[in-house]
Image (cartoon, rainbow, N blue to C red):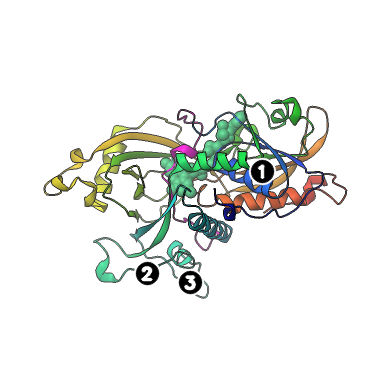
Amino acid sequence: MASSQRTPPVTQLDPPRHAVVVGAGVIGLSTAIRLLEAGYRVDLVARDLPGDPLSIEFTSPWAGAHHVSVANGADMRLHQFDARTFKVMSDLIRSDPDVPLFFAKQTEYREEPEPTEGPGQHAGQLALMSRYHPNFRWLAPGELPTGIACGAEFTCILIHTPDYLAYLVGRVKHLGGRIHRCGALASLAAALEVDPSLSSADLVINCTGLGARTLVPDAKVFPTRGQLVIVEAPWISQGITRLGPAREGQPRVYDYTIPRPKTGHVVLGGCAEQNNWDPNPRADMTRRIKERCLALQPELLPPDKRTGGTIDDLRVVREAVGLRPTREGGIRLEVELLRTAAGREIPLVHNYGHGGYGFQSSWASAEAAVELAGRSFDGSGMALDRAGKARL
Ligand SMILES: Cc1cc2nc3c(=O)[nH]c(=O)nc-3n(C[C@H](O)[C@H](O)[C@H](O)COP(=O)(O)OP(=O)(O)OC[C@H]3O[C@@H](n4cnc5c(N)ncnc54)[C@H](O)[C@@H]3O)c2cc1C
């Protein structure tokens, strides 16, 4: 691992504060890394760990994934998080040849026009992405397929999620963090009972994704079901997204293809079914995904099937379903006080609710959680009441 990829410690804490991070998805692992770099002693506890057999209760290993923001001008916090994370990931690619992140060409199509920036109007997704994606270019009208109102192409980042999670685990351990498997915790305070050495911890960081719904509890957290079809098409090196029109109170229909470098696979989606917990692929959705993605990128077919080929000629590796940990109001970055079994009150920093954008917002969200953790103690190290009303 190249040493230049590690951010220098923000703070040297003496003695170090002891943080227990609950959750080992992309959010828990990224947060643990930033805490360790900031001088904290870190123990991470989780029911599911990277490398486990796939479980519908653990979202991160299911994701496609690519860094293509869904933020628009109505959510500038998310835009800032995504832009910052793009910068961190870009620096990782440049400094560490082994990091499982890859630059790739991305094409975005929109069935409805998107606002550009101007007085009195929020910028659309593409206008915000134009601020930080290299090689950004609006497509000319003559380049747009039928039914597409606007589009752009640019360099995005592809994330090989199982390998990237393993890479993050390696960084946590390299920095001295400890990782413990636990059963399904009944409360966040129970995280301090997982090992006797955790009972005197100074703070807990909650990165439990969908688990926060019952663990906090937070009724604003709900699943957004995503079904995928993974095909073999090693000749595909660029991804394409087509986004349908806005629908009142409902996610927009969208189709996407995401190459997974080195595997020769391409992830086909998408679907975003709110409050649907069904863990099994549905045949009707599989068919829809194949048809729409093939219309989007006919080169998904093997070269010898391009003329007259159909969805039956796609080389399907498997179908999959993952549940995005969505939250009304977006990511919760907030501090409360947690009463431990021994009756102490310690800061509890929440960092959950990343919906369909947990990888692309991960580093900025982790940095915000560490900032909240630092702000939740007074000068003498005591936990502030309601942690000083800290909220981001
Ligand atoms: C189909 C699909 C495609 C996606 N594509 C993208 C994409 O292209 N780009 C992108 O940025 N994001 C994408 N996402 C979203 C991304 O995967 C999530 O936002 C992210 O994985 C959430 O990470 P997390 O760490 O919050 O949650 P998780 O990965 O679910 O981790 C939660 C952790 O908390 C632990 N936990 C939960 N409850 C308990 C409990 N009671 N006791 C003990 N431990 C507990 C779990 O064991 C686990 O370790 C996609 C998601 C899906 C499903």
Residue found at x 68% / y 29%: 187
At a point 65% along the width and 48% down the height, the residue shown is: 34
Q: Earlier in the sequence, mark 3 or mark 1?
A: 3
Location of residue 266 in the rendering, given as x and y in whole percent from the top left corner = 32, 45
Q: What residue type is labelled 3?
A: Glu
Q: What element carries label 1?
A: strand
Asked if the stretch drawn in magenta spans residue 72, the answer is: yes
Chief SS of the magenta region: loop
Q: Is mark 2 on a helix, strand or loop?
A: strand
Residue 273 appears in view:
no
Q: Which of 305 and 324 is in front in this view?
A: 305
Looking at the rendered image, the disc whose residue lies closer to the viewer, 2 or 3, is 2
Nearest-to-viewer mark from 3 and 1: 1
Q: Looking at this view, name the residue that lies furthest to the left.
A: 308
Q: Position of residue 265 (x, y in %)?
A: 32, 42
Q: Give the range drawn in magenta.
A: 52-75
Q: Name the residue under label 2.
A: 137
Q: Decide which of tag 2 and tag 1 comes sooner along the chain.
A: 2
**Real-space CA distance between mark 2 and mark 3, rounded to the nearest whole angstrom:** 15 Å
Count residues near mark 1 (Cα–Cα under 10 Å), then give few for <14, some for 14-19, many for 20+: many
Residue that mark 1 sits on: 350
Residue 56 shows in the view: yes
Is 67 situated above or below 24?
below
